[in-house]
Image: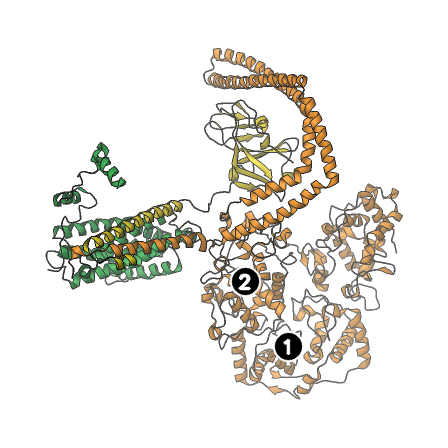
Chain colours: A green, B orange, C yellow
């Protein structure tokens, strides 16, 4: 109770007033305004229907996916503190995360398992949306964004695979990018690729790897895509995804 | 069913949070305890050290508390008290304080003076700069003024400094009695205090990961986090991981831990700290598991280009010796052995040399013919062996032929036996389990040579070995024709194997075409030309699996230069895959039974014994693709010495360098001749060349080449002219400046005492190895007439530093002084014929 | 909790208070967890090993240092000069000018350390004699290790004091061999 009194007092001060806009008076209007006035919550719908919180219907998969995304972001940023994206150090940094960095192995494991889980939860989320027909108008655009987010999740997984710079990652990326050789028009082994002058040194795979084989350039590319570019794009799309759901009448639920 | 609003998830929430808390606690435990086994090891080690120190402390305390020490200590104590009382008397104290105050004043003044002096210097530098830049006359004046001032200040500071010193000495003098006594008393407790300090420091040692980081070698070794006492001189426990490193002198002394780390030699996963298995690299996908026991010597070859004779590298150097003896490089490409000549004899004229039956037997299983055989067993069956011999015989005799045994001429045999002995053939050639003391070169075992070769060939060979085999190391003995027929008669009759005689063909048999073809195919398949020169196949490729594309061209076997770092997954374990789990066991199996992995493998069975396998295995594990910086390399620069002039022709002919060494080239069996010209007296040398006498034990003795009626070194045909050439060469080329020609005069040997030298000679136990007259051992050369053999200068230098003149000499360095050296030299000089 | 269940019949207020307890316990647990995680992440920022040159360096036996010589071999790698005087005392001087932190050079012909940046000069004891440097050069702790090698401990620094001769105020910085 002490805490609450102190907190109430604090809200009366100028500093308190400058931070918290609303007095805590539990009326429906105030609740609504609190949500709207809060930068972290304003994407959230002001009101939701009873059915929307029913776990049996939504499975909570979208929320869990978002939570995993947050966990991945935090643990990923922390891991970056001990990672040098160059071919000499990358693998050794993995070893050192295991052997010397305090809680390094813990963070690596969290990051890894959260990444695996996120792929699964994204799929389950889409399955649920599909089964409940939640992609139907007016939510078609949310579905499209969702599909893009699925692709981004997979790309994040793929680019992250290279970063430990072990044999597994190295060959996974070698094989994975070899598929890009067969891209129509843009790959040097794809349909119409050679006719358009594609070689191993100017096609789409070359642009992905920054070279004709997986090397130092590919590693730093994987690193930038994984840690900067893809997370930013993903965050933006997540924001759009949430915003559209809100605009389109909140989470779908049983009628 | 309740409505959503009424449902409570509070319990789920609590359960979830509890689970999370439990997991977090487990994570913390795992992180700080499970993954960090070194913490406990370090704690335990510190306890062990402290326990040992405490024992020492007890001992040292007991010593201090002993009556005699206590008495002395108390004496000092009372003396100190007296001195203190004296020092603390008011008169002394006022004086002391006064001096102290004055010292303080002077110090303050000095401090200010230095400060001002520095300011002056700064403004001087500034003005100087201005003057140089603008050449202003005013600046010049200021400079002169400043210069004067600076000189004054300088003087003043010197004065103040000396003043300060005087006060200091004065003060020190006053406190001297007290200080001195205090120091003496401290001396009693010094050991105990030190121990206490050490105990205190070890009790609060930081528990941390110990790391040696050497970017140059790409090593980050944390081994000493657990092996915490490994580089300490104090051994507190002989149990792992607390022991100290064995053989510290060589292994740590010559290889500073901070420069080499641990894994450079021992391998293993240096970075790993979380478990013993990981640290030792005994985990999947770690290519360099720790080398245990003698296998660690594999790492010597990484930096040491030459490991022969290297202390602590006996196993690997035996491996390399085995490689060279067995000629692995015939089939396998090995870095450093690319341009070496083929190990086996030339086969192009084999038909004229040996008997058909013998050759077939030999090919089927060389060891059954001669247990000492160097050639491995290829496992040919009768037909295959015959086909190969057919092919080889077709090259010159065109038929299957054997020379029938015949009754020897016993007179000739007796004469031949004498020649065989006098020529000391058995120094190099073993026969009937005797002889063959000179192991550095390979000389064929003669036990069954009578059934092997044809007498016509033997006669030609003895006449001039180089004609049949230009690269042979056998000297041309310059036998006369009569001697040759006697010697060959003896050899043919003495060294006979009756089993082979019984199998011999009675008459010629023609060779079938299809046999020749099969023979050619087999030779090509098994790569006989890797070791033997065969007419028509000089350029054929060698055998064995290829590791790199470019090797296909010239080797039939696998390149083994980097076999020690080949990932285990890429080794073909074939049929025995379930038994072989790592690189080490693969290589061991390959050496023991080369063809066990698959059918149709080519490598023959060498019948290595256990020691050879250990040596080869160690060596192979050391053949890695790793590179170390040049700074770490111990290079073995091959000698570029070449024989020159007329001497070369003679030396080639009698093969001096098969036994002797000159400037790093040669057999290393007989004495090093590099400084022979400075070493021996020319008169003696002349006599010796004509008639070698006994210096060394029988089996190491130079062959008595004098066999005919005329006196001469090599078979009586080393003419006066040739002796002169040899002596000239030795006298002009094989000399060193370390030994002056006119040594005797320089050192004034006249006033030294040879009798004392003799006494010294006996005292140092020289007779244990050397023989004089009838006394003494037979390890070193006989010294009975050493004075007429060796130059005094050499005798002197040799005793001053035996290893300088003869690298690797076994003679100990007694570190004698000048007088002793001269005495003993004089004694030896007096030992004349 | 089980006991509570048995004693009291299920009714609205009880259920409410139990819910309250669960919520409070849950959130306190969550707070503890967050604090714990914060501690974990804080610990994460203090690495256990470093890849810097070590603070304690062994530099060889005293006999390798000639009397009256300033040894500049360890300047680049370890940032230290080893100076042995005509007698048998050794000192280790930090190679950082006390003016603005440049690295001075040892000028044998002038028997001085000279800083190339602003011309500060120091005697072989480290005492500043010219230029803008306000105080003598710093020294490192130097001892003999168990194996007879000289051990420079860069974590112990004897800071030069203006106008004071370092030899006098830091007798412990001198190693007698």
Left/right of residue C51 with respect to residue B371 in the rendered view: left
Residue B667 picture quarter: bottom right
- The residue that appears at 66% across and 45% down in the rendered structure is B58
Q: Are marks 1 and 2 on the same chain?
A: yes
- Tell me the distance, in whole angstroms, between the alpha carbons under discs 1 and 2: 28 Å
Return the residue nearer the eye: C69 or B222. Answer: B222
Return the residue nearer the eye: B538 or A80. Answer: A80
**Which residue matches tag 1?**
B367
Left/right of residue B222 with respect to residue C61 in the rendered view: left
Q: Secondary structure at mark 1?
A: helix
Q: Quadrant of the N terminus of chain A?
A: top left
Residue B390 lies, in percent from the top left, at: 58, 81
Q: Quadrant of the C terminus of chain A?
A: bottom left
- The residue that appears at 46% across and 17% down in the rendered structure is B130
Return the residue nearer the eye: C38 or B770. Answer: C38
The answer to whether any part of residue A204 appears in the image is no
Q: Tell me if residue B509 comes above or below residue B803 in the rendering.
A: below
**Which residue matches tag 2?**
B621
Report in which chain the residue with disc 1 lies: B
Q: Tell me if residue B762 comes above or below residue C66 in the rendering.
A: below
Q: Earlier in the sequence, mark 1 or mark 2?
A: 1
Left/right of residue A196 with respect to residue B505 in the rendered view: left
């Amino acid at each position: 109770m002490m805490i609450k009194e102190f907190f109430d007092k604090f809200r009366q001060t100028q500093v308190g007033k400058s931070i918290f806009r609303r007095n805590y008076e539990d009326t429906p209007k105030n609740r609504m305004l609190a949500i709207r006035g809060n930068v972290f919550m304003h994407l959230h719908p002001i009101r939701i229907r009873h059915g929307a919180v029913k776990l049996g219907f939504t499975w909570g998969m979208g929320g869990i996916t978002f939570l995993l995304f947050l966990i991945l972001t935090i643990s990923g940023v922390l891991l970056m503190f001990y990672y040098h994206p160059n071919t000499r150090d990358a693998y050794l940094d993995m070893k050192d995360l295991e052997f010397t960095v305090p809680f390094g192995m813990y963070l690596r494991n969290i990051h890894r398992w959260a990444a695996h889980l996120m792929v699964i939860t994204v799929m389950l989320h889409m399955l649920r949306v599909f089964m409940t027909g939640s992609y139907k108008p007016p939510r078609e655009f949310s579905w499209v964004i969702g599909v893009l987010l699925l692709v981004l999740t997979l790309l994040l997984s793929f680019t992250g695979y290279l970063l430990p710079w072990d044999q597994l990652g190295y060959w996974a990326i070698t094989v994975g990018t070899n598929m890009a050789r067969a891209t129509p028009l843009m790959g040097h082994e794809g349909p119409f690729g050679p006719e358009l002058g594609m070689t191993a040194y100017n096609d789409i795979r070359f642009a992905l790897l920054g070279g004709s084989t997986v090397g130092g350039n590919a590693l730093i590319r994987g690193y930038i895509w994984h840690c900067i570019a893809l997370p930013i794009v993903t965050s933006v799309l997540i924001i759009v995804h949430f915003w559209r759901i809100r605009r389109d009448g909140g989470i779908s639920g049983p009628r | 069913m309740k409505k959503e609003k009424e449902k409570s998830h509070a319990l789920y929430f609590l359960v979830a949070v509890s689970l999370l808390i439990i997991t977090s606690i487990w994570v913390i435990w795992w992180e700080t305890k499970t993954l960090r086994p070194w913490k406990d090891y370090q704690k335990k080690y510190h306890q062990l050290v402290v326990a040992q120190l405490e024992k020492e402390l007890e001992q040292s305390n007991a010593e201090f508390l002993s009556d005699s020490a206590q008495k002395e200590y108390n004496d000092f104590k009372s003396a100190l008290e007296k001195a203190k009382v004296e020092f603390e008397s008011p008169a002394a104290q006022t004086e002391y304080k006064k001096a102290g105050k004055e010292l303080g004043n002077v110090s303050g003044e000095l401090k200010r003076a230095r400060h001002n002096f520095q300011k002056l210097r700064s403004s001087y530098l500034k003005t100087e700069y201005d003057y140089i830049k603008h050449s202003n006359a005013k600046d010049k004046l200021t400079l002169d003024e400043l210069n004067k001032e600076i000189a004054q200040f300088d003087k003043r500071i010197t004065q103040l400094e000396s003043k300060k010193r005087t006060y200091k000495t004065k003060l020190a003098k006053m406190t001297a009695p007290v200080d001195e006594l205090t120091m003496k008393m401290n001396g009693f407790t010094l050991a105990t205090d030190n121990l206490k300090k050490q105990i205190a420091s070890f009790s609060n040692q930081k528990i941390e990961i110990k790391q040696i980081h050497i970017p140059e070698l790409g090593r980050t070794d944390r081994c000493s986090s657990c092996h915490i006492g490994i580089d300490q001189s104090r051994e507190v426990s002989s149990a792992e991981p607390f022991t100290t490193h064995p053989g510290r002198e060589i292994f740590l002394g010559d290889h500073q831990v901070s420069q080499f780390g641990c894994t450079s030699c021992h391998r293993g996963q240096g970075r790993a700290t979380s478990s013993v298995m990981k640290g030792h690299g005994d985990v999947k996908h770690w290519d360099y598991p720790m080398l245990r026991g003698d296998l660690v010597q594999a790492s010597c070859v990484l930096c040491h280009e030459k490991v022969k004779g290297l202390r602590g590298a006996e196993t690997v150097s035996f491996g390399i010796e085995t490689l060279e003896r067995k000629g692995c490089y015939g089939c396998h490409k090995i870095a450093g052995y690319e341009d070496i000549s083929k190990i086996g004899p030339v086969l192009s004229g084999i038909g004229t040399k040996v008997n058909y039956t013998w050759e077939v037997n030999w090919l089927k299983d060389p060891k059954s013919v001669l247990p000492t055989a160097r050639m491995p067993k290829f496992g040919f069956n009768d037909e295959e062996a015959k086909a190969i011999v057919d092919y080889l015989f077709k090259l010159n005799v065109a038929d299957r032929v054997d020379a029938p045994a015949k009754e020897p001429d016993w007179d000739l045999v007796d004469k031949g036996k004498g020649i065989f002995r006098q020529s000391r053939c058995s120094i190099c050639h073993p026969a009937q389990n005797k002889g063959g003391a000179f192991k550095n070169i390979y000389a064929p075992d003669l036990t069954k040579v009578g059934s092997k070769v044809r007498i016509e060939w033997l006669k030609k060979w003895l006449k001039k070995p180089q004609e049949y085999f230009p690269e042979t190391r056998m000297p041309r003995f310059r036998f006369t024709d009569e001697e040759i027929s006697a010697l060959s008669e003896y050899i043919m009759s003495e060294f006979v194997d009756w089993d082979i005689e019984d199998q011999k063909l009675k008459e010629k048999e023609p060779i079938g075409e299809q046999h020749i073809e099969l023979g050619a195919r087999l030779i090509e398949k098994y790569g006989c030309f890797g070791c033997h020169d065969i007419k028509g196949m000089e350029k054929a490729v060698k055998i064995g699996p290829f590791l790199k594309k470019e090797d296909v061209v010239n080797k039939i076997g696998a390149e083994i230069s980097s076999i020690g770092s080949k990932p285990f997954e890429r080794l073909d374990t074939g049929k025995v895959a379930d038994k072989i789990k790592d690189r080490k066991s693969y290589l061991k199996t390959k050496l023991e039974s080369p063809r066990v992995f698959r059918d149709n493998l080519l490598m023959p069975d060498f019948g290595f014994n256990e020691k050879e396998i250990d040596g080869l295995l160690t060596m192979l594990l050391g053949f890695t693709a790793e590179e170390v910086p040049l700074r770490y390399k111990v290079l073995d620069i091959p000698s570029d010495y070449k024989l020159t002039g007329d001497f070369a022709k003679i030396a080639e002919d009698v093969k001096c360098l098969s036994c002797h060494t000159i400037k790093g080239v040669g057999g290393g069996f007989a004495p090093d001749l590099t400084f022979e010209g400075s070493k021996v007296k020319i008169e003696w040398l002349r006599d010796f060349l004509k008639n070698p006498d006994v210096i060394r034990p029988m089996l190491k003795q130079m062959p008595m080449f004098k066999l005919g009626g005329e006196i001469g070194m090599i078979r009586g045909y080393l003419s006066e002219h040739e002796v002169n050439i040899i002596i000239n060469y030795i006298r002009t080329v094989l000399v060193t400046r370390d030994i002056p020609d006119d040594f005797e005069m320089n050192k004034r040997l006249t006033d030294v005492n040879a009798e004392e030298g003799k006494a010294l000679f006996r005292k140092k136990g020289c007779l244990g190895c050397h023989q004089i007259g009838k006394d003494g051992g037979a390890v070193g050369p006989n010294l009975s007439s050493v004075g007429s053999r060796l130059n005094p200068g050499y005798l002197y230098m040799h005793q001053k530093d035996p290893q300088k003149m003869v690298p690797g000499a076994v003679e100990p360095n007694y570190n004698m002084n000048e007088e002793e050296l001269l005495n003993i030299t004089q004694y030896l000089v007096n030992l004349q014929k | 909790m089980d006991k509570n269940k048995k004693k009291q019949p299920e009714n609205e207020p009880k259920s409410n208070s139990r819910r309250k307890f669960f919520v409070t316990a849950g959130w306190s647990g969550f707070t503890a967890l967050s604090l714990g995680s914060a501690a974990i992440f804080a610990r994460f920022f203090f690495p256990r090993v470093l890849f810097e040159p070590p603070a304690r360096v062994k530099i060889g036996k005293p006999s390798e240092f000639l009397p009256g010589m300033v040894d500049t071999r360890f300047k680049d790698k370890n940032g230290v000069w080893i100076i042995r005087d005509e007698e048998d005392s050794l000192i280790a001087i930090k190679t950082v000018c006390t003016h603005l932190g440049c690295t001075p050079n040892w000028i044998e012909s002038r028997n001085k350390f000279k800083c190339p940046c602003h011309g500060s000069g120091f005697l072989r004891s480290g005492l500043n004699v010219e230029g803008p440097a306000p105080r003598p050069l710093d020294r490192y702790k130097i001892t003999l290790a168990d194996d007879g090698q000289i051990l420079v401990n860069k974590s112990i620094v004897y800071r030069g004091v203006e106008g004071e001769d370092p030899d006098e105020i830091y007798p412990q910085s001198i190693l007698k061999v």
